[in-house]
Every structure is written in C-alpha cells, then in structure tokens.
Image (cartoon, rainbow, N blue to C red):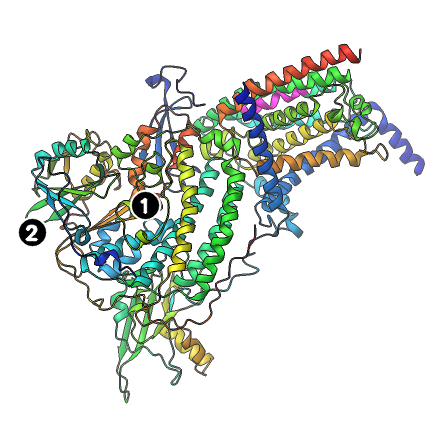
Amino acid sequence: MIVKEPISTPGAPNETFVINIGPQHPATHGVLRVKMTMDGEYIVRAEPVCGYIHRMQEKMGENRTYAQFLPNTSRIDYLSAMTYTHGFVGAVERAAKLQVPPRAEYIRVITSELNRISSHLVWWGAFLLDLGGFTPLLYAFDDREKILDLLEGITGSRLTYSYYRIGGLYNDVDDDFIKGTRAFVAQMRPRLRMYRSLVTENIIFRKRLIGIGPISKEMCRKYGATGPVIRGSGVPYDVRRVEPYSVYPEFDFIIPTFEEGDSMARYLVRMEEIAQCLRIIEQALDKLPSGPVMAEKVPRVLKLPAGDYCYAVEAARGRFAVRIVSDNKEIPYRVKLRTPSLSNLSLFEEASQGMLLPDALALMGSLDLVIPDIDR
Amino acid sequence: MTQAIANLLKLLATEPYRLLLFLVCMLAFVGLNAAYLVWVERKGAGRFQRRPGPTEVGPAGLLQPVADAVKLMSKQLIVPAGADTTLFRVAPLLMMSPALMSLAVIPWGQGLAARNINVGLLMIFAFGSINVMAIMLGGWSSRNKYAIISAARVVSQNVAYEIPMLLVVITMIMVTGTMNLSEIVQQQAGGFWHWNLFRVWLNPLMPVTFLIFFICMLAETNRAPFDMTEAESELVAGAYTEYAGMGFGVFFMAEYANILLGCALGTALFLGGWQSPFGVLSGVIWFLLKMYFLVFSVVWIRWTFPRTQFYGLLNLSWKILIPVSLFTLVLSSAMMKLFHA
Amino acid sequence: MKNSLKELVTGFNSLVIGMKITLGQFFKPTVTVHYPHESLKMPKRFRGHIELVRDPTTGKAVCFACKLCERACPSDCIIVEGAKLDGAKKRSVTQYMLDFTKCSLCGSCVEACRDGAIRFSREFNLASTNKEDYIMDLFKRLQDEAKANPEPQAKAAAASPAPPNAVPKAESAQPVSPPQSKN
Amino acid sequence: MESAPTAVASQVLPNPLAHLPIPFQAVDYAAKGYHLDATVNPDQVVAMAAQLDKEGLALDTITGVDWMAQGQMEVIYDYFHPAKALRVVVRTRIPRDNPEVPTIQSVFPGANWHERETHDFFGIRFLGHPNLTPFLLPEDATYHPLRKDFTS
C-alpha cells in the first residue's frame, strides 16, 4: 500500500519546506520536537530534537545517597516506574551482595508486570489517538485505572510508586491486593478479546499499519533498539529471558516475536505481551511464598565496594540498564541510566526517510516513546 | 383579528414572502441544529466512551452550546501576519452559506420546502462543491504550513469523492426520473418497502448505492474516519489552525450544517423522506427521525474508527467506490430498459 | 480480484463488528467519578504530604526532633527544630516545617522515622494559587488540631503505616475497590 | 524455593570472544552485571567496534566517567548480544585536559546520539562526529555538568 516514489525529485532544495512536529504538537505526547524537511507530504529528513525536559538525573545521582536517589528512578519513565526502580535497586543489591527474600522478588515481578500492562495500555490508547481513534483511549484508561487502584492500594501512589527498596520492598502486599489482582487478570482477558475485535481486526487500522515503517533486524542492532521494537523485527531479545534477573526464570511465558518488522508487528508484540504478563502474574500469585519482604542486615549507611556494577531489566519499552560506578562512599561516583526510548527513537531518522507524514507518525507511535525517558 | 392573521398567513404563503419566511426558519433551524449537534456529538462521544459527557452547564449539559458560543464570540478574531486578510475572513462565510442555501430545497414534509424547484438535486450539488473552495481558501490564506497541506488534501479528497457521489445521484435521478426532491419522496409513499433503499426490483444493488452515498457524504463533509483535513495528530487543526473565535466557530457550525444537509439528502433520496414506514401517518416527524438517525450514525462512526490513511482514502474512492457506482449506474439503466421501459 | 473482494467483505465486516462493540458500550453505565461532586476514598497507604502524629496518651507530638527525616529527605524540604523543655525527660519538637513545593512525596522521611512520629495525611486536594500555602508548618497544625480536638485520637495514630522495615503485621482492611466486571 | 539470582554462586564463564584480538577479561556476571571487560587505547575503539559488530553485537550505550583525581576521562562502550547472554564493556582512558576519542558512528549509527550525549555531559570530543551539537542540554550550552569540577 505504501507509495515509495515521491512525485517530484525528492529533496530538491527548492521543493522542500520544514515543519515542526512539536515541541507542542498533538502527535508527540510530550515535548519531543521533530524537525521535518518535507517534500509535499513526503519526508526528506526527520530529525528529532531532544532535551526539552532534560532534568540531569545522572547528576542528581551523584549528589545523593543510593536510598535518596531511589525516588528519582520512578520519574524517568513515568509509565513503567516499577521496572525502572527494579533496575536501580537491582544494581545496588548486586554491588552490595544483598539477598532479597523470595517473597519480595515475587511481589516485584507481580507489580512490575502489572505496571507493564498499564504502560502498554496507555501506549495502546495513545497510539490509537495518533491514528485518529479516540474511543479506545478511554477504554484503555478504564482498564488501566483498575491497575492503578491496585498499585495505589499497596504503594500509596498512582504513578511514581517508589515501591521497591534496596534489599526488598517498602511494604508487604495484603489479601485485597491479591484478590484484586486475580479479579483483574480474570476480567482483562475478555477485554483483550474486545480490543482485538474493535481495533486489531479493524480494516482501517490494519491498512494504516501493515507494511508501514518497516525496521530490519540489522537496523535494530545497529541502533541498539530493544523491547517491542526489536521483537517486532523478529529478534526474540528480552532481558527477562536473555539475561534473566529476579525470579523470571521460574515462570513459563512466551517472548512474542513477529518477523514483519512493520508497525503492525510492533503493535501485535505489545498486545501479545499483555496476555503474557497476565500469565506471569497468575503464576506468580500461585507460587507467592510467605516470609519477609525485606532483606536482613541492610546497612543503614550503604557504601558499595569500589568498582562498577551493571544491572539490566526489561522495561515496558525495552532494555533499561543502570551502571553504578562506586568509589566506596555513601554517594555514588557515577550513575548511568541507559534508557530504551533513546535508542528506539534514534533509528527514526533513518527509518522515516521517504515516508508520508501520517505514516511516519504511525511509525513514531509504534515506537512507544516516553519523552522523559529519552531526556532523563 | 383572526381575519388579519389569516390574511397575514395568506400573504406569507405567496412566493417571495414564503421564501423569506422559510429562509428565516431555516437559519434558525440550522443554527439551532449546528449548536445542538455539537452537544449530541459530545454527549454521544461520552456515552460511547462510558462517561457522561457535558453535565455542568444547564440540565444534562444542555446549555453547553450556549456557553461555547459565548466563549467563541468573546474571543478576538486574529488574522495571522502575512495572511490574505480578505480571503481569510471570507472563507468561513463561504463555507456556511452554500449549506444554508442548499437546505432551501429539502422537502421536510408534504409541501414543506422553501423552494420546491425541479432541479433541486442539481442545485444542491452545484452549491455542494463550494465548501471545498472555502476550506481550501481558508487553508491557503492563513499562511500556515499545516493549513496548506490540509488545503491540498481537502481538494484531492473532495474531487475523488464528488465523482462516486454524483454517479450515485445520477443513478437515483435515472431510477426516479426526476430531480425534484419532493417528487422523489412522493414516489416512495406507502410503506418502507417502497423506499428507494429497498426497491431492489429497480436495482438489486440499491443498499450498496445507499452505502456509497453515505460514505461519500462522510468524506465530503470531512467527517471521521475521513477527516484528513483536520487530522489533529498530523496537522494540528488543518485548515482551521489559525482561526480563532467565531472564525473557527462558523467553520465548525458549517461542518454540522453540511452533515445535516447530507443526512437530509440521504433521507429524501433513500429513506422515503417524510413518508412513514407503515404507509400511514406520514409527516415531518418521520423525516426528522430518519435524518437524526443518520446523524447519530455519523457520530457513532466517528467515535468508533481510527482515521483512514490518505492514499487509502483515495484508493477507496478510485478503486472501489467509482467502479461500483458506475456498475450500479449501468445496471439500473439496463434494468430500466429491460423491465420498466 | 478474488482476494481484494474477500478483503472488501472481511474489511466491511470488521467495521460492522467495531460499530456493534461501541454501541454495546453506549448503553452501559458510565465508569467515571464526577469529581467535584463526588470523590474517591483514599486508600489506607495513600501518600499525601506528611503530618506529625500525636501521642495517644499525652496528646503531644511523638516527634522528639531527632532529624532523621531531615537527613533522609532527598530534596531538603524538611526543617525540624527541637529543644529540651524544662522538666521534660527528652527533647521535643518545637518547629516542623515542610516545604511542599520541593517535596516529591517519596516517603523517605516516614520510612526513616523509627518512632512512627510522622505519617502520610490523606489530604489529596492541595490546589492553591498561593505559593505560601505550601510552606507548611506541621507543628502549628498539630497544635491547632490539639486545640480543636483535645481528646487524643488513638485511632488516627494507629492508622499510621507500619514502618516498612518492621515485620509486616496483618494489615487492616484496605479500601482497594475490587475491580468490578464492566465489560 | 529458589533464591534470587543476586545470590547465585560466582562463576566466571570462559570468554566466548577469545578469538578476537581484544584483551578481554572474563568477569563474574553475577557480581558485576557483564561478562567481558576490556581496556583499550583510544585509537583502537573503532576497530573494536567493527570487530564486535562482525560478531553480531549491538551497541547498548556510550558513557563517560570523570576521574578527576587521576586527570583522566574514561569512555565506556557497552555492547550486548541480541541473541545470547553476552554483555561486553570496552573502556578507554583519555587525558582529562584534552578528551578526544574517535567516533564509532561509522560502525554503529546509533552511537551518534550517545556520543552527543557524552559530549554534552563530559565535554569529550568525538573526532569525526558529524553533528557534535548539544543534544539534551540547551542549544547554547558550553558547560559539561557531569564533570566533577562543574558547579552550577
């Protein structure tokens, strides 16, 4: 369906003009700016301009103790705060050789996966909004609301949870949470079927995504794209499987991959992932051990042995890695946050060349960008 | 006294006054409808999305359109620097007036049309093409890149959809043998099986014809899923980006007036106009019921589907709608020649 | 030709199915809470801004200005002053300022407090047009509250979240509304 | 109940990239979070990147560390393998007063943004980079906030 050949000579200087998509534009969901050199409706060059909400999180990391930096990790990618906190506490625990009680690890998995579902739901709604369908957004938020209620019940916060602690959890879950989560899992499945008939099978929607914005395996590798983007290109790369962390090896789940590499493939990966998240949550609830949720002997003043430590997790948008360089002080020497959205967006310039404007926006939506995640 | 009123009515029934009266009524009707269709749209969107919609202004949010109008009117009309001032100001009016004029030939009930002219359909389509011009001029004159892209889109979209629309209407003119809308409605009297939509003995593809008409109507009025001109995730607000206050308000009202016109036309052409579905108790009420059902469908469609792709939209027109409508045209002429000559 | 016809039919069918679904939702009750007129009950563990806890026996603040919270705060938004009052065995708090404009509601302070002297309030509607409203004098608040309600609220003190490092005891029932089936 | 992986007994796996002429040191993954670690000279980073590219690795990120006491800057290249558990760290040290290192953009186009970011934060110049303008910092920024002597 995609028309590849522009009508006039593409990119001839007297034929092009520049339009700004962003930093205030309905398509960018945040303050991303894409400077697009256009030839008619064809994109000659689309250059993302980042940094509009740069907060220098890494400098903040050098100014405060490990425990004090922890709340910041919820605010990098505000849609999947749990996984980001997991990455940070994981790195610290790895360096301090802390052993996290199994109950805490299971609850981390449950809450991370709930958070992943909520993140994918927001993406789903916002993506449909990009494509001009408004109603699915509200249905997605209706479901997401239930997750937020559950997480608010145990963490006290709806978006920036700061729920994990170095060595365990802030608080144990209660029976209401477990009951509520089971109820949610049970009622999410029919909703997914409804989403499929309402959106996934819709001919207008399919026409807008199939074959649009193909990204090859090679391009993903060269740009370091991860998460649903690389899985949509047929590479089963998932940190949960490739570099297993926490208790993920104990669960039976599939890493959905699609070979096509187009926007539809990325869409389907995320939709299938929601179903897999539900499976993981169910298994984790079944296996949930009892016991403490906080490691014993977490030192009040935490000093990590000198050296550098990495920890990677699979966030909703891909691989999130933390590198802590310590010089045996209370305050880290350097905290590097490797965020998935930055790498995922960096391929946009190459991938969007010669595309039509609406197609490029469909491609951008399918990358699932969270701007603070890029700008940090 | 009664005599005076009767005289007045008699006077008003004469042609020039009758036209004036109907125009005034029409203006009021369209204005009210445009305002309240916004309410219907918002309320409907709310219900489709499991939320109540506007509730705060007046009972059930019924005064919301008034509040909106006051807000729009109290805003400054800004003409962007470098814009073509005249065209920029004229464009909204150019969009509104054809819709108003076209409604003059719509037969709301038996003998209830401002002008019952023999070429009513022709007149509607003659005026119908003007609103394309209006959006194009609005987009062009506002000197904004989004608006210009939108202006280019609206032209190619409307050119593409004018053709199947006209082919369908020509089919209907052939089947009914007249361009007078009142006459077309008269022919459909006596139960819903006499409606053009169901007269498959004239043309077995009549429901398809209606569908094509409806799709073209959506595309011509730039309604979702064909709202390429104001695709907010791409073009912010398209041709209306630079319009503020009532400039935007008039565009907005004209959009709803056009929807109203399209639905009224669909009702008259296919759904038997003011004829009751059971053959008795015909009247204006039936026309309004059918028309508002179509309007509801338009809202319903808008809040269900994502926007089409632009080339998908043109493909749909050139590759599916035009061939099919040509086929129905040929089929009905053949049927006429063979069976109803 | 055959394929495109098939696509046309399945495509049209998918549109009809979509419209059926939205129409089904049209007649279902709304799921929203009409906010200014009704609001949700905040869950037990809701993290609002912090407030001082009154000792259920004495009615005075539990806090004795050990300044652990001040040190734990990543954004330096707490200022605590304490003094040893005449005749008292230990220090007691004399000033407790919270600069809510800087606070990120992370809860580090509540966690750092070993005596359960501060807790999260259930206050969520903190909108104001005045910046000074967010420089909160929590000690004054406590005193005002003590004046208005001299009976020590044992119940309120018990509702403070358990310190996270403690072995979790059976949480009291929480208003996590179980998600109702709405589809 | 299985214990968490943080407690997995330390084990150093043999170097799967031993055939490459890179001075890799195998590292205990459970303790450090990566498998291979190499320190190379600054002029070798492009060759390293090309070799790792041939092995099918992907660029994870590029970052710097300011070792002010030693008068050095460290540039860290992180690589990961998209199919197997293999994380590779390549480091290089450059003088702090003249931090220059060749760009690996020709090998991994994704390095473009990471190098710009590192230039923003540390002032490390990536020689041959086509567009070393501020990426996350304001357009006119001349400061480098992650340098240890930076004060706002």
Verify whether residue B86 appears in magenta: no
Characterize the local packing of mark 2: few (<14), some (14-19) or many (20 or more) Cα atoms within 10 angstroms: few
Between circles 2 and 1, the one closer to the viewer is 1
SS type, badge 2: loop
Q: Residue at x 12, y 32 (%)?
A: D47
Q: Is residue B294 left or right of residue D30?
A: right
Instruction: Pick whichever, B111 or D66, lies toward us.
Output: D66
The answer to whether residue B242 shows anywhere in this view is: no
Q: Report which residue position mark 2 lands on.
A: D69
Q: Amino acid at mark 2?
A: Ala
Characterize the local packing of mark 1: few (<14), some (14-19) or many (20 or more) Cα atoms within 10 angstroms: many
Which image quadrant: the N terminus of chain B?
Answer: top right
Verify whether residue B126 appears in magenta: yes
Q: Residue at x 36, y 36 (%)?
A: A232
Cα gap from disc 2 to disc 1, whole angstroms: 32 Å
SS type, badge 1: helix
User: What secondary structure do most residues of the magenta stretch adopt?
Assistant: helix
Magenta stretch, residue numbers: B125-136
In which quadrant of the rendered view does residue A96 lie?
bottom left
- Chain of the residue under the numbered disc 1 shown in the image: A
Instruction: Pick whichever, B72 or A258, lies toward us.
Output: A258
Which image quadrant: the C terminus of chain B?
Answer: top right
- Chain of the residue under the numbered disc 2 shown in the image: D
Q: Amino acid at mark 1?
A: Asp
Q: Is residue A169 left or right of residue A300?
A: right
Residue B92, how many percent across, how many down?
58, 28
Q: Report which residue position mark 1 lands on.
A: A373
